[in-house]
């Protein structure tokens, strides 16, 4: 098992810049200084070039002056509602993905956020790893295989989307349809951390937080079939964070 | 008015009210007419009787004064004919007066002395002989060959002969008949018209009541911000609508207050939790030894548990207060439970639990999909946490009447006896349970917010049983397409 330090390192800068060949510009809009402080620090550590604003007005000024690759917006701002801010940003031509941070829980607020131009949301408190994983997910449009591809290769692992079959080093893996979908998701996000809640919402279509290890058991089973004896283990567990499928 | 309540008109209150009102009106007018009819009939008879008595006296007088010679027959006959032309109630079109009036004189020997009228007078004489004669008082006489009776008055002359003057009642009857026909036609029209007016008025009024009911039931199901329709009139129904709306104002404001309290509580707790968690994570990422990182990791775990507890507590509090915001969509329970079992099955079989589902196929309900997911997840988490190895879990899905029923049974130790009666209350949990005691409270609150019910018991053969009954209201489809876009992006 990797140490905590290694886990975090996995999420951080070294392969971000490698992937994008330049650092990503991120606008952070958060009014709580405490939260803004640590977010700014860890986002910079993860390789983002971060500008931070405490209110909507400043955020709009920043957005007018520079092009950002991704925005992180808190819904509870002192001068205006976060959703209104997103609407204003969209109207002023900002099309970059937006990740909403919210202390509100009810679903309709979240949906409202998504409908009006936000692309993903996280409820406070959240794991930094989750935030980083989701940010990369939002930026993936420049990345990895397109959805239309019929085949996907990660190292010696190969997925055939037409036959719904996976093989490793030419040897067909005996996967259930569910396991195939899970492996597909991991492969499409190869080299990036996927969290349990990402798996639950993307693979099973559920926004739940089970207090049992249901997702882990699926991963253990999948690992039992993919990472058989004598092969290099591909699926890694990052304790307290999620999983990553090695891509190099 | 929508056709949502598929009641045929005949079952509506408006129909019954109009029917009873019209019946009372119809009976009342009928009685009034019967009395009027009786009065008119009596009056007509009184007039003909007066005429008869007058004429018979004149004729008696003429008969007495006219010498009994050859001309007697002609004189009396002509006077009688003249009299018959002045018949009361006679229709102008009826030219033949002969069959409506007859004059008859019978000698003291009982033989026919003089006859003026239609025919030879024999049947009239026979009828007079058969009937009991009351002198000077008009009476009814039925004569063979005439279907209408005659009104007859008799007079005894000085020479001992009897004079009879008869007037057919056919004109009188015709008048009365035409009166009856006209009345009945008019009566039928008035009754129909009255029914229509009453029906229209009550239907309008009750339609308004139904609108209020429908609006109120919509409000009860989802949206607290709408109000029942009010009209400008200051009547009972207007008051009902106003009262309902005032009540809704109060409910909405207290629910809103609750939302504000929970939201601000959540917000005030979440911000420091986020900051603490973030700082811990950053501490973890800086150069620390593995031994030093352990307490940080466990602090993060504790923090996550605290967050989860905060979330469930607020959810349960909101659900208990019926303040959950439901975004209902059509959900197939069968599909949902199956995918939930797919998710949980590996974990369960790892623990040595067997889970089986019995379902009669697709069962669609209107529900908040996200909440429903959490309800099922709570139930399965519950089983996972409380069952010892090699137990069975049976999940049955079916319908009964207008409800979907979902039962989760197991052959484990069952509910602890001390909690069976109040397992759905917050913070109630078995002594050995490690949970917060919120899972089932949440399940119950969500199901109740959707209009369903949950019962829990221990099976007689051992093990626990939870039954959820979920209403299947197909009539109202509330479609919020974006709540799915969220999970299937």
Image: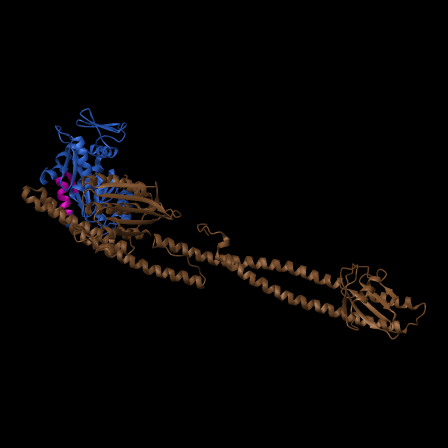
Q: Residue B424's spot in the image, x, y percent?
A: 25, 54
Quadrant in the picture for residue B389: top left
Please, is residue B154 above or below residue A154 in the view? Answer: below
B85 vs B398, nearest the viewer:
B398
Q: In this view, which residue lies farthest toward the bottom?
A: B158
Q: Residue B27's spot in the image, x, y percent?
A: 59, 63
Q: Residue A29's spot in the image, x, y percent?
A: 20, 46
B283 vs B34, nearest the viewer:
B34
Q: Which chain is blue?
A: A
B101 vs A89, nearest the viewer:
B101
Q: Residue A73's spot in the image, x, y percent?
A: 22, 45
Task: Report the span colored magenta.
Answer: A36-50
Q: In this view, which residue lies farthest toward the right?
A: B70
B108 vs B351, nearest the viewer:
B108
As for residue A46 lying within the magenta part, the answer is: yes
B402 relative to B46 in the view: left or right = left
As for residue B6 lying within the magenta part, the answer is: no
Please, is residue A85 above or below residue B89 in the view? Answer: above
Q: Colour of chain B?
A: brown
Q: In this view, which residue lies farthest toward the top?
A: A170
Please, is residue A118 above or below residue B226 in the view? Answer: above
Mark yes or no: residue B288 visible.
no
Q: In this view, which residue lies farthest toward the front?
A: B461
Mark yes or no: residue A219 visible.
yes
Quadrant in the picture for residue B418: bottom left
Quadrant of the image containing the C terminus of chain B? top left
Secondary structure, magenta segment, majority class: helix
């Amino acid at each position: 098992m990797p140490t905590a330090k290694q886990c975090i390192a996995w999420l951080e800068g070294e392969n971000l810049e490698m992937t994008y060949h330049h650092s990503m510009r991120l606008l952070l809009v958060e009014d709580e200084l405490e939260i803004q402080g640590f977010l700014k620090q860890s986002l910079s550590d993860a390789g983002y070039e971060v500008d931070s604003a405490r209110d909507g007005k400043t955020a709009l000024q920043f957005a007018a002056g520079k092009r950002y690759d991704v925005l992180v917006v808190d819904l509870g701002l002192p001068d205006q509602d976060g959703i209104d801010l997103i609407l204003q940003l969209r109207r002023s031509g900002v099309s970059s993905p937006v990740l909403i941070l919210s202390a509100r829980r009810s679903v309709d607020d979240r949906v409202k956020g998504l409908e009006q131009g936000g692309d993903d949301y996280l409820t406070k408190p959240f794991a930094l790893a989750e935030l980083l994983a989701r940010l990369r997910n939002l930026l993936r449009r420049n990345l990895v295989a397109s959805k239309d591809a019929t085949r996907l290769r990660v190292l010696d692992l190969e997925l055939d989307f037409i036959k719904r079959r996976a093989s490793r080093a030419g040897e067909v893996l005996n996967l259930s349809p569910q396991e195939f979908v899970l492996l597909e998701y991991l492969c499409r996000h190869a080299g990036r951390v996927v969290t349990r809640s990402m798996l639950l919402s993307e693979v099973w279509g559920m926004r739940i937080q089970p207090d049992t290890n249901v997702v882990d058991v699926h991963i253990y089973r999948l690992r039992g079939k993919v990472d058989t004896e004598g092969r290099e283990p591909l699926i890694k567990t990052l304790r307290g964070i999620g999983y990553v499928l090695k891509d190099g | 008015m929508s056709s949502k309540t598929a009641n045929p008109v005949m079952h509506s209150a408006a129909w019954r009210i109009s029917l009873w009102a019209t019946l009372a009106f119809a009976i009342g007018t009928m009685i009034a007419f019967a009395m009027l009819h009786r009065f008119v009939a009596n009056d007509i008879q009184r007039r003909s009787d007066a005429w008869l008595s007058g004429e018979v006296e004149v004729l008696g007088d003429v008969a007495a004064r006219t010498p009994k010679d050859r001309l007697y027959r002609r004189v009396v006959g002509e006077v009688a004919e003249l009299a018959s032309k002045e018949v009361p109630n006679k229709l102008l079109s009826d030219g033949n007066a002969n069959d409506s009036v007859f004059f008859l004189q019978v000698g003291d020997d009982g033989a026919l002395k003089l006859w003026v009228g239609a025919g030879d007078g024999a049947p009239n004489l026979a009828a007079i002989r058969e009937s009991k004669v009351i002198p000077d008082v008009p009476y009814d006489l039925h004569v063979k060959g005439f279907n209408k009776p005659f009104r007859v008055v008799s007079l005894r002359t000085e020479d001992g002969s009897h004079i009879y003057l008869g007037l057919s009642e056919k004109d009188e009857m015709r008048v009365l008949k035409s009166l009856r026909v006209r009345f009945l036609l008019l009566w039928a029209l008035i009754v129909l018209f009255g029914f229509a007016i009453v029906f229209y008025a009550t239907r309008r009024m009750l339609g308004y009541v139904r609108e209020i009911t429908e609006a109120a039931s919509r409000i009860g199901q989802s949206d607290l911000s709408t109000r029942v329709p009010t009209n400008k009139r200051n009547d009972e129904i207007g008051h009902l609508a106003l009262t309902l709306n005032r009540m809704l104002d109060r409910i909405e404001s207290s629910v809103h207050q609750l939302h504000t309290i929970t939201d601000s509580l959540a917000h005030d707790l979440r911000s420091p939790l986020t900051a603490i968690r973030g700082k811990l994570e950053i501490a973890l990422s800086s150069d620390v030894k593995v031994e030093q990182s352990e307490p940080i990791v466990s602090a993060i775990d504790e923090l996550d548990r605290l967050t989860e507890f905060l979330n469930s507590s607020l959810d349960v509090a909101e659900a208990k207060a019926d303040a959950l915001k439901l975004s209902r969509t059509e959900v197939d329970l069968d599909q949902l439970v199956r995918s939930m079992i797919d998710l949980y099955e590996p974990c369960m079989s790892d623990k040595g639990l067997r889970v089986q589902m019995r379902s009669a196929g697709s069962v669609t309900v209107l529900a908040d999909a996200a909440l429903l997911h959490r309800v099922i997840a709570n139930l399965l988490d519950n089983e996972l946490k409380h069952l010892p190895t090699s137990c069975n879990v049976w999940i049955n899905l079916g319908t009964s009447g207008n409800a979907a029923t979902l039962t989760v049974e197991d052959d484990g130790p069952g509910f602890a006896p001390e909690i069976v009666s109040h397992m759905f209350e917050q913070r109630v949990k078995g002594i050995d349970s490690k949970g917060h005691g919120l899972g089932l409270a949440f399940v119950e609150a969500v199901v109740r917010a959707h209009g369903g019910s949950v019962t829990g018991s221990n099976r007689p053969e051992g093990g626990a049983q939870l039954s959820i009954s979920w209403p299947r209201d197909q009539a109202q489809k509330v479609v919020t397409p974006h709540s799915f876009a969220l999970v299937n992006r």
